[in-house]
Image: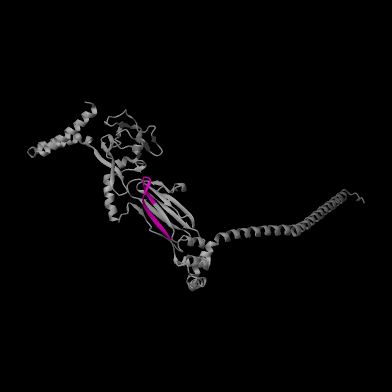
Amino acid sequence: MNINQAESFRRRGGLKAMSWILSKKSLITPLNILLLALAFIVTADDIGWCETYGLKNPQGEFIPKVTIAMSGKEILLKKVNPNEKFKSFSITLNPKNKNLIRNIGQVYMEWLDASNKPSKSVLFAGPLYNANTRQFQDSLVKSNGIRLTDKSNKNLFASKTVGDLFSVGIDDQTLLSSEAVTEQDRTVKLGAGRDVSINVDKKSVVLNESNIKSGELITVENKSGLDQIFGVDPVEKGILYFQVVRIPEQNRVPKESWDRFSVAADSGFFIVVIPEPDPAQLLQLDGKEIIIKIYQGNKVRETRRIPIKIAEDLKIAGRKLSGPDRIIGESQSGKVDSAKADLAVSGQASTTKGASGRIEAIGKERTKYSMWLWILQIVNLLLLAAMAVYTFFFILPKMQILEDRLTKNEMFIHNSREAIREELDHLKQEFMQQSAGTPPTE
């Protein structure tokens, strides 16, 4: 008898002993109850928990695929049908469980063959593990299951559910717990067949005067408790700005991934929709739909359609700006002539005058901005040319005259200073001669 068989025998023996004592009413005494409690404490860590995981078929029936049993520091994943072959089998760690992600290097795994004999123990975070996606992926064809063992001293599996640790996928489909599916089915019946765990805050988008510039936001929340795969089909025409942004990360989903992207549990995304200000393109949006798809594996499980509606005043004003022919083309019967279209527009012109003016201003806003920029540049060039001409013909001659006058004044002052100096020298000489008693010389 090997260690695994002895351990299994001990567990079964402990459970059988407890059940036998409970079946004998005559043995239910305070002493036996105390012994029973001690036995339960001894075997409690080894009993663990077991859940069945599987998929839902198109008819909504739950198909079990694997059982996951947790016992102490061990997790055992086994096929429900040993003959079933999983070409793609994945285990993805829960991104919220930072402790497990940091210590994943101390988790080992063993493959179980058809007779449940384990293979050599290897690191879970080996060549088949992608640290960026936190995913282990391989096939599960010949083996009957996998056993994970926590060899650290941190009790990575203790007091955790399977969802707290990881999610299991088969052929790109995330497995669901049988208990979660039962609860979801009970909830979906209350919601008239729709999965209420996926919350979309708007049933339609109505564009009017108040939001034609700022646009609208559509918020989608994943409250299912599991990672979900979504897809978004945008409206190609008439949209000025369309973007998908994750919540709460606030980072954008690349356009090439809009058709299929993953959303973690308890998170979501919002869609930004800003229409074109051009009236003709705005009218094309009326009745268009933004499609939100919810995948299960490679198939679309559910589709949410968010129609876009244009307010009546904007619709009438846009038709007026686009001409009466557009009214004829958009009429439901297709038989309204141009005279009736003109009467329909003129009859409501008084109520939509302000709206049409605002839409026309929005439609020509960019053109006016560019035109004003060109006008300002031309005016600046003309002012510079005028200043250059004025400077050349008026300022420069006056500056030359002022310079000549300054030069003459400087020469006059210099000559006056020299004459005064000579006169002073002559007076000084006469004064000295008179003081010496000699007649002055001529």
On screen, residue 59 versus residue 241, left or right, reads left
Magenta includes 304?
A: yes
Q: Nearer the viewer, residue 175 or 326?
A: 326
Coordinates of residue 419 in the picture (x, y in percent): 84, 53
Coordinates of residue 200 in the picture (x, y in percent): 37, 54
Chief SS of the magenta region = strand
On screen, residue 9 versus residue 288, left or right, reads left
Identify whether 221 is placed above or below 10. below
Residue at the image position 35 percent from the left and 39 percent from the top: 92
Residue at the image position 39 percent from the left and 54 percent from the top: 219
Q: Quadrant of residue 5?
A: top left
Coordinates of residue 426 in the picture (x, y in percent): 86, 51
Identify whether 225 is placed above or below 347. above
Number of labels in the image equals 0
**One can see residue 378 in this view:** yes
**One can see residue 151 in this view:** no
Outermost residue to the left: 26
Q: Nearer the viewer, residue 25 or 175?
A: 175
Identify whether 339 is placed above or below 277. below
Residue range of the region highlighted in magenta in the rendering: 293-308
Coordinates of residue 207 in the picture (x, y in percent): 44, 61
The quarter of the rendered structure image containing the N terminus is top left
